[in-house]
Amino acid sequence: MASEPVARAVAEEVGRWGSMKQTGVTLRYMMEFGSRPTQRNLLLSAQFLHKELPIRFARRALELDSLPFGLSNKPAILKVRDWYLDSFRDIRYFPEVRSRNDELAFTQMINMVKVRHNNVVPTMALGVQQLKKELGRSRKVPFEFDEIDEFLDRFYMSRIGIRMLIGQHVALHDPKPEPGVIGLINTRLSPIQVAQAACEDARSVCLREYGSAPDINIYGDPNFTFPYVTLHLHLMLFELVKNSLRAVQERYMNSDKDVPPVRIIVADGEEDVTIKVSDEGGGIPRSGLPRIFTYLYSTAKNPPELDRPNTEGVTMAGYGFGLPISRLYARYFGGDLQIISMEGYGTDAYLHLSRLGDSEEPLP
Ligand code: ADP
Ligand code: MG
């Protein structure tokens, strides 16, 4: 346990760093900088992170301490807050990075920080779920949760940025990168290929859950490529395709009609690459549309227990995070996600990815 004065000193330091200005980067900058991963550049990158990451961790730690409705005092939220404080401390008090050896030690340390935060999403969700249950019991009128949803948007957006910065720096140390790959960025990413991989993953989850899975047809130029982060695109498509498969599956499960395939269309525009995931799963009622981008909203019948670890991402549906988090990933690099529904017929999800790569990280 830290003594009182030490704890106070750290709290002051968090307050000071938490009010400093964050510095955003762009996809293009990360790509250009990372294309020359020389010793000197890795050192510069580490020095930038040494200054930038404590600011980002401190801001989130401060916000986690001042949430409405007593959310800050939920054990799960306190746990997350402590991870942010620990990471702030680890980086803030790491000695100045001057030599190659310093740089390697720093890189190892921030990689460990990234691992510490692996379970932030389900842990936060657990805290919010507890609060929702309590408030739902104590109030007769449906509770407005906007404030919490806005906070979670800021919080998860910041997390995407922190993980991108650390992940990119660590990945630049790969001694033998694949051709065209710069850290986490694939400069020649084929959306068709990523779509195929995401569909395979989503179909296997569907098969496991229902015993069968609708077909998926993918349309677009297989030779078309553009620079993007494979991990991010895979995650977004995986979530969208799971939603479509579930809707179609549940609609046709007990019928003898032909099951209409899910269709994915890739369009390469000048400004945007747009990927449409289109299904005939019956759509979403217009009254439900405003809620689909809120956290924990799900129409899944058996929502998984959030306090059971290691189920994140491998369930078909039920957390209600798929859409809001996918939209944050799209927006992180200047894109967006829109859902258009025809109730009684089906849903189209439009995933817009900005091609120019010039949009700066949104920094909540
Ligand atoms: P989850 O899939 O865990 O429920 P999501 O954020 O992915 O959470 O989706 C939220 C809700 O939006 C779903 O529970 C479902 O009711 C609705 N939804 C999303 N995509 C579709 C779709 N393609 N067809 C019908 N309903 C959908
Ligand atoms: Mg989903």
Image (tube, rainbow, N blue to C red):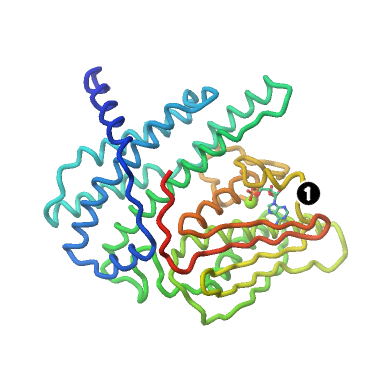
In the rendered image, which quarter is residue 5 located in? top left
Does the Cβ of the disc 1 residue fall within 8 Å of ligand 1?
Answer: no
Disc 1 crowd, CA 10 A, few/some/many (<14, 14-19, 20+): few
Q: Which amino acid type corresponds to the residue marked 1 in the rendered image?
A: Pro
In the picture of the structure, the residue carrying the numbered disc 1 is: 285
In the rendered image, which quarter is residue 125 located in? top right
Residue 144 image point, x, y percent: 65, 31
Closer to us: 149 or 119 = 149
Residue 132 image point, x, y percent: 62, 29
User: Is 23 rendered above or below residue 181?
Assistant: above
Mark 1: secondary structure: loop
Closer to us: 168 or 272 = 272
Q: Quadrant of the C terminus?
A: top left
Tell me how many marks there are: 1
Instruction: In the displayed orientation, state which residue is furthest to the left.
Output: 99
Instruction: In the displayed orientation, state which residue is furthest to the right.
Output: 256
Closer to us: 333 or 95 = 333
User: Is 225 rendered above or below residue 117?
Assistant: below
Residue 53 image point, x, y percent: 30, 45
Asked whether, in this view, residue 120 is left or right of residue 131, the answer is: left
Q: Quadrant of the N terminus?
A: top left
Asked whether, in this view, residue 344 is left or right of residue 267, the answer is: right
Residue visible at 64% across and 24% down? 135
Residue visible at 20% across and 62% down? 41
